Image: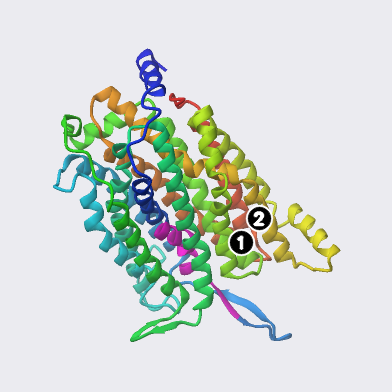
Amino acid sequence: MDETTEQIAEELDHSAVHGSMLTFWQRFSYSLGEMGVSLSPAIVVSWFIYFYTGRPVMGADPNTGEAIQTGTLFLVSPFAIGLLGLIGRLVDSVADPLVGFYSDKWHFKMGRRIPWVVFGTPFLILFSILLWFPPDGEGMGQTLFSINGMVINANFLWLAFNISAFWFFYTVVVAPYLSLLPEITPYNDERLKVSELMAYQDVVGMIIGSIAVGVLIDAFSGGWDLGFVHFTNGYQVAGVLIGVLFGVTFYMSIGWVREKPVDETKVVPFNILEAAKHCVANPSFLPYIAAVSFLRLSVDILVALIPFMVVNLMGLSESLAGIMQGIIVLAAAFAFPFVSRQAAKHGKKKILELGLLTFSVGMVAMGAFYHFPFIGYAIKAVAGLFGKELSIGWVQFLHCVFVLFGCAFSIGTVLVLPRPIYADVMDFDAERTGYRREAMYNGMEGLITKFAAGVAVFIVPQLISILGARPDKPWGPLAGIVVAALVMIAAWLSMRPYPIEK
């Protein structure tokens, strides 16, 4: 770290630490948008791959008459779902710096950020709903043509358009929303408080997007008639209900906060390439962005694997898959106040590093669920003392659940700390350049981290397709957990050179 970088980092470590300029209601209402940030993507990340390529086709065993899995429902091919998921996130990642640049550059009566949320949200609701209404919900349907052996059908074209549009408008809304945080308060303690509230909203959004969706999928598995509208499955019911709630949270988030008036620090003279170069030149940017990218890749792999683990390997229901996804953040919610206190006491960097390293260890323990669920066996032994028998599926499920509860602090750090750390990165840039460019920084973050998320969407179906996700061939989910743990260690290593100890 050079002398100038060290001096700026030291100044930031001691500046604007204590203070408050927001009411509790302003903090809370702004944080509601974070529920929207996590809500609809939680459904897409958690269920998108499984909906299009993973649902079991059930039939009767000819000998015993018991229900068994006779096949897998494919609406598109495994390679296609991976490719389209990656393309959608590439659209999202490319849109991020563009939206960030123009959000920094353009000024409206309502401000630089709020108009994007106002006008982008209806489109985001629309495309988040359409994802779950493919033209042929019963299978691959008619092949229109093929490219190098990849089948192009109506579902492929529908998904290609809607997943790209969804992620584009997600960026249009979310990047400006998140860029409001450094503007609404300059105080480190208050940013941590707002970020903690946002983390709770993250939990609510993810729980609704996982547990509630799992329950809805089961409850409306046979379809639902709402007046003249017919839903053929629970995924469609959940998509509509969550899409509407998603929009409500964003509109509430901007209802009680106002942007600061335009001043010379907000008139950014750079073109988009110069703005990007200034971001990369910030010594605190690259360590942060590498760590968060690996973190995003790791978590998205883990979350996408859970329906395959719970339904296909454990033989349990989709609602229980949703419960396991929800536990990832529900357990962490109890640790949020402790995480905030420790970050204020020891520094955000140190606590995040600890969380990344311990989360990777927890993933290794979780990966033992299929062949050696040691925690599940202990629970089974205790249950046996009370005359209760647990199936192997429940033993494996409870093993994973208790591992996730054991990772509560680790998960809490990765949910609470990245945003206030990134606010410090933006402050570092303002000290170096004299300009406030929050949206461009969020855009550059999205360009890189969302590509990482796209890689996760591509990796998971290929692992499942090649290595399997059936009781007789379980290696896809197991290999995926190992990959997720290794990527989390890469996140920890990347955070080490980050220069701000604040």
- Residue 454 locus on image (x, y percent): 41, 51
**Whole-Å distance between the Cαs marked 1 and 2?**
10 Å
Please report the bounds of the magenta region as a residue range.
39-58
Give the amino acid type for the residue marked by disc 1 in the picture. Met
Residue 206 lies in the magenta-colored region: no
Q: Residue at x 67, y 61 (%)?
A: 397
**Which residue is labeled 2 in the image?**
400
Q: Nearer the viewer, residue 81 or 253?
A: 253
Q: Nearer the viewer, residue 143 or 95?
A: 95
- Residue 422 locus on image (x, y percent): 39, 35
Q: Quadrant of the N terminus?
A: top left
**Which residue is labeled 1 in the image?**
309
Disc 2 on helix, strand or loop?
helix
Q: Residues within 10 Å of mark 2 (few under 14, many from 20)?
A: many
Residue 372 seen by the camera: no
- Residue 477 locus on image (x, y percent): 60, 57
- Residue 323 locus on image (x, y percent): 57, 62
Marks 1 and 2 in Cβ contact (< 8 Å) = yes
Q: Quadrant of the C terminus?
A: top left
Magenta stretch, main secondary structure class: helix
Q: Residue at x 18, y 38 (%)?
A: 261
Residue 44 lies in the magenta-colored region: yes
Q: How is the image coloured?
A: rainbow
